[in-house]
Amino acid sequence: MIMSCTSVMIEENDGLPSQICIQCLQQVNRSFTFKKLCEKSDAALREFLQKNPELKGGVATDQIIIGDAAVHQTADNTFEITMNSVQNNI
């Protein structure tokens, strides 16, 4: 997971520790989950725009629903992504 989220190379017998602390493990898990969310969102948006080419220049709405995800722009110009009842603020 670390190598898929960073440019750090991890190899067996490289002389570095083979374990990480629980806080680092939690951060790696959060980073990996965010990476997967970005990849899924990108694929869904590209598929949506391919099926709706008239929207490629932009979408004039404050909320987009794609499959099981909804993206909503808030009053403070941040974005909320809702997927299967789980909400993430970006």
Image: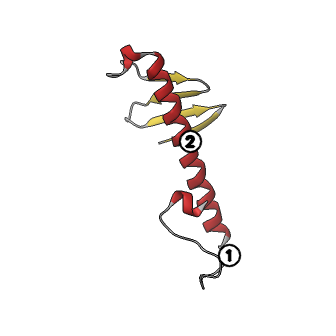
Q: CA distance from mark 1 to mark 2?
A: 26 Å
Q: Residue furthest bottom?
A: 15
In the image, what residue occupies the spot 50% across and 68% down?
8
Classify 10 Å Cα crowding around label 1: few (below 14), some (14-19), many (20 and above).
few
All told, the count of numbered labels is 2
Q: Is residue 22 visible?
A: yes
| Residue 9 circle label | none
Q: Secondary structure at mark 1?
A: loop
Query: Looking at the picture, which amino acid does disc 2 mark?
Result: Leu
Classify 10 Å Cα crowding around label 2: few (below 14), some (14-19), many (20 and above).
some
Position of residue 42 relative to residue 26, above or below, is: above
Q: Position of residue 22 (x, y in %)?
A: 68, 68
Tell me which colouring the rendered structure shows.
secondary structure
Q: Quadrant of residue 18?
A: bottom right
Q: Left of 6 or right of it: where is 68?
A: right
User: Would you say the residues marked 1 and 2 are in contact, meaning their CB atoms lie under 8 Å apart?
Assistant: no
Q: Position of residue 65 (x, y in %)?
A: 53, 22
In the image, what residue occupies the spot 64% across and 61% down?
26
Sequence-earlier tag: 1 or 2:
1
Q: Left of 49 or right of it: where is 60?
A: left
Q: Secondary structure at mark 2?
A: helix
Q: Which residue is mark 1?
A: 19
Q: Which residue is mark 2?
A: 37
Q: Quadrant of residue 27?
A: bottom right
Query: Looking at the picture, which amino acid does disc 1 mark?
Result: Gln
- Quadrant (top left, top right, bottom left, bottom right) of the N terminus: bottom right
